[in-house]
Amino acid sequence: MELERSFTQYRENFYSRWQRNILNLSLIVAFVILGIEIFTFHSLLSVAEREFRKVSYILARIVIPTVINFGTILATSFVLKSKKIKTERKNFAVSFCFFMICSVLSVFHNYFQILLLSTCISLLLCSIFGDTKILKIQVHLIIPVFIIAAITFWFDKLTGIPIYKILTIICAIAFIAFTYVFARAVVISQKDQLKYIRRIYERQTELVEELRIDPLTKLCNRMAFNETISRIITLKKESDICPFIVMMDIDFFKKVNDRYGHVYGDEVLVSLADIMRDNVSTRKSFRYGGEEFVLLFEDNSLDRVVKIVEKIRREFSEKVYDFAPDESFTISAGISAYRDDMDDKIWLECADKALYFAKENGRDQIKVAEL
């Protein structure tokens, strides 16, 4: 579950960056188109003022395209800011925004023949998101846009003789088809790369988890404990929680090893770890070192913590072992709540003192630290 959240967050951040980049690119292209059209308008006005229809040119080449471009960009920016809209829909929105910019370029400004192919750029750009659905939708939208662009291009007086127009349109169709094939290959490649990154991430996470787990008891180790206690202290400073730490120690464990051997000593350690795991989640249970174990409670009450630790103490003392059927092994425990002026060392030391007091007063008991 943690891996899935981390990988999802990675993808969210990756797509979010590209969403902003594409929207910014759309805005830049829209301003550039507007600037070029204004410049072209003044140039044509000075060269062919008599034959030049000012009103129709301003309307068809400047006003309508500008309204469409900036209206689309504005609507897309609202979509990207919304927290309720899913990432996939935002990817589609920003891809469609750039597609509209390219379509406007193709339909309204295609007296430059190369601009008939403008929509191909949006195909390549949307492949960044690795979504074949977005790619297919854009391909279906490109067809009517290209037909409209080809018609306006055909009837434009500046575009040359009929045979030249036909060849231009045929070349444009071939180029669009090639771009689609290329963009689809990029999308597939993008998916493969994401799968490969995920596999590496999973393996890396597994290796990190292995470093955090004690190989004998399968509980979290001291490194994991240091990370968790720091996180809980930080969380306590930011919110109203009531954390507890419990230090436990197997009584006279050295005698167990000396009398029965380390193999059976390990069996006792594993049995305590199993009992801890049955009563508290693995991420809250730690082997601190040797026969010392720690429990961390992020937010709980003292009565509840004492009840859980007492259950662990009782179950462990009642455990029967084949190598020592007539002997009972016990634990002592010290409990400490967190106080605002504590750091991790002081907090742990407070629980350790309570544990020491429990051992000094007969063992096989629980002592709560006085704060």
Image: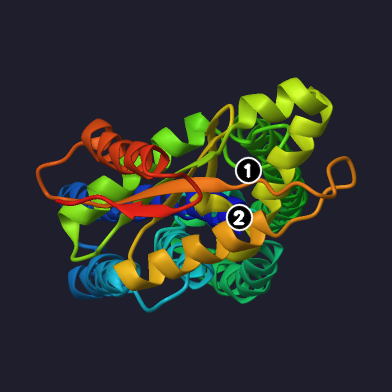
* Location of residue 103 in the rendering, given as x and y in whole percent from the top left corner: 48, 65
Q: Is residue 343 left or right of residue 327?
A: left
- Say the numbered circle drawn on residue 219: 1
- Give the structural element (helix, strand or loop) at label 1: loop
* Location of residue 218 in the rendering, given as x and y in whole percent from the top left corner: 69, 41
> According to the image, what is the colour scheme of the structure?
rainbow
Whether residue 207 is situated above or below residue 311 in the rendered picture: above
The 10 Å Cα crowd at callout 1, few under 14, some 14 to 19, many 20 or more, is: many
Whether residue 140 is situated above or below residue 317 in the rendered picture: below
Label 1 amino acid? Leu
- Give the structural element (helix, strand or loop) at label 2: helix
Q: Residue furthest top?
A: 258
Residue 32 visible? The answer is no
Label 2 amino acid? Met
* Location of residue 325 in the rendering, given as x and y in whole percent from the top left corner: 85, 49
Question: Residue at position x 70%, y 58% from top?
Answer: 166
Q: Which residue is nearer to you in this view: 300 or 293?
A: 293
Q: Which residue is nearer to you in this view: 74 or 84?
A: 84
Q: Quadrant of residue 297?
A: bottom left
Measure how far apart labels 1 and 2 are at the Cα level.
Answer: 9 Å
Q: Is residue 9 left or right of residue 126?
A: left
Mark 1 near mark 2, Cβ–Cβ under 8 Å?
yes
Dot 1 or dot 2, earlier in sequence: 1
The residue where tag 2 is placed is 276
- Say the numbered circle drawn on residue 47: none
Residue 297 visible? The answer is yes
Whether residue 6 is situated above or below residue 141 in the rendered picture: above
Q: Quadrant of residue 38?
A: bottom left
* Location of residue 368 in the rendering, given as x and y in whole percent from the top left corner: 29, 54
Q: Is residue 257 left or right of residue 64?
A: right
Question: Residue at position x 63%, y 37% from top?
Answer: 209
Q: Which residue is nearer to you in this view: 44 or 357?
A: 357
